Image: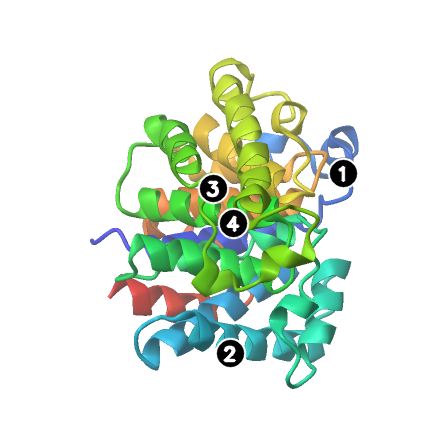
């Protein structure tokens, strides 16, 4: 059976989301008292997901549409992302406690003729930027420049902070490396090297004049701020992978995940604690004090990209909400 990393990553992301949705906003002692031991956390019968999966599907559909129209270029992707984000914003299904940054930016993106840079929330680096970026790391045939530019652009439409851009780029890069079979043991080192290589690289063709909305003297200083915050947390992650007990809340080591760089680091930490036990990794991610659904979302994307579609229990995968949409996108990219 071929690995099917795209199907594995998208299903894993949604399963993590559904597992963490009921535990979000709760302390670890409260989660344990309500749901029992963390290693036995069960998916709810309805397996409902949050806006994290909805927004991932929006990015995935936008990317597929843009690639159907030809070579993936900024204007083409921006147009389809904008359509998908506004559709999500106006959908009656958008009732899963979405973040204020996404809501405000999408409201502004509705206006015909408004530059997307004017809708972007330049001060926000919420995890909404990167919890939805996995499709960019899974789509085949993209160059490194396209992958980085697309990852940053999809973040920037709503979250314009440089750390949101860097964390989204790193998240997509991690998913891409794992889908291609990179050894998890060397992953954090690869991501640190990538961050250092890109520290002052501003993607003008993808981001336009976004940086001018900030207080930074130039585009290089603008992006460096984001990469430096990501490098700092990747250093903490490298230490945590070696020293943290799987029995303690991972958020204590790498943050609660409300912001983009913490969601990346804590999602990766849960995966790296259990690289060959994907369900245990998801359970650990869902039993956290922070933004449990977003952290588990990312953990599921990493584990599924690494292990493929077979990683997930069939009875879980069968009842996940939006399963048809997730499987269709996965099949498209796994083909």
From the image, state whether disc 1 or disc 4 is nearer to you.
4
Residue ID for mark 1: 34
Mark 4 and mark 2 residues within 8 Å of each other at the beta carbon:
no
Residue ID for mark 2: 79
From the image, state whether disc 2 or disc 3 is nearer to you.
3
Q: Which residue is at 35% across, 70% downward?
A: 72
Residue ID for mark 4: 168
- Secondary structure state at the residue bearing disc 4: helix
Considering depth in this image, is 70 or 275 the residue closer to the camera? 70
253 on left or right of 12: right
Q: CA distance from mark 2 to mark 1?
A: 44 Å
x and y percentages locating residue 189 in the rendered image: 38, 27
Q: CA distance from mark 1 to mark 4?
A: 33 Å
Residue 231 in sight in this render? yes
- Secondary structure state at the residue bearing disc 3: loop
Residue ID for mark 3: 200
Q: CA distance from mark 3 to mark 4?
A: 16 Å
């Amino acid at each position: 059976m071929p690995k099917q990393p795209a199907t594995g990553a998208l299903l894993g992301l949604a399963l993590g989301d559904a597992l963490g949705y009921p535990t979000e906003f709760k302390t670890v002692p409260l989660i344990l008292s309500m749901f029992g031991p963390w290693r036995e956390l069960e998916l709810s019968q309805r397996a409902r997901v949050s806006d994290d999966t909805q927004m991932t599907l929006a990015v995935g559909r936008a990317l597929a549409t843009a690639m159907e129209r030809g070579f993936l270029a900024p204007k083409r992707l921006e147009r389809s992302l904008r359509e998908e984000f506004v559709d999500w914003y106006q959908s009656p299904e958008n009732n899963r406690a979405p973040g204020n940054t996404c809501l405000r930016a999408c409201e502004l993106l509705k206006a015909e003729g408004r530059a997307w840079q004017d809708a972007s929330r330049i001060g926000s680096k919420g995890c909404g930027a990167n919890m939805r970026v996995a499709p960019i790391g899974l789509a085949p045939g993209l160059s490194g420049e396209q992958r980085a530019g697309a990852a940053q652009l999809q973040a920037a439409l709503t979250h314009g902070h440089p750390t949101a851009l860097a964390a989204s780029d790193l998240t997509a890069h991690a998913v891409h490396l794992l889908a291609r079979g990179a050894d998890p043991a060397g992953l954090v080192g690869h991501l640190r090297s990538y961050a250092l290589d890109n520290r002052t690289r501003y993607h003008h063709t993808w981001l336009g004049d976004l940086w001018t909305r900030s207080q930074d003297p130039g585009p290089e200083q603008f992006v460096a701020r984001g990469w430096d915050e990501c490098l700092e947390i990747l250093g903490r992650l490298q230490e945590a992978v070696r020293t943290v007990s799987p029995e303690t809340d991972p958020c204590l080591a790498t943050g609660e995940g409300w912001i983009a760089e913490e969601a990346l680091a804590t999602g990766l930490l849960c995966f790296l604690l259990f690289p060959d036990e994907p369900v245990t990794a998801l359970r650990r991610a869902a039993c956290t004090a922070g933004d449990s659904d977003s952290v588990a979302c990312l953990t599921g994307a990493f584990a599924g990209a690494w292990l493929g579609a077979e990683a997930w229990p069939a009875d879980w995968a069968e009842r996940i909400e939006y399963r048809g949409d997730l499987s269709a996108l996965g099949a498209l990219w796994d083909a």
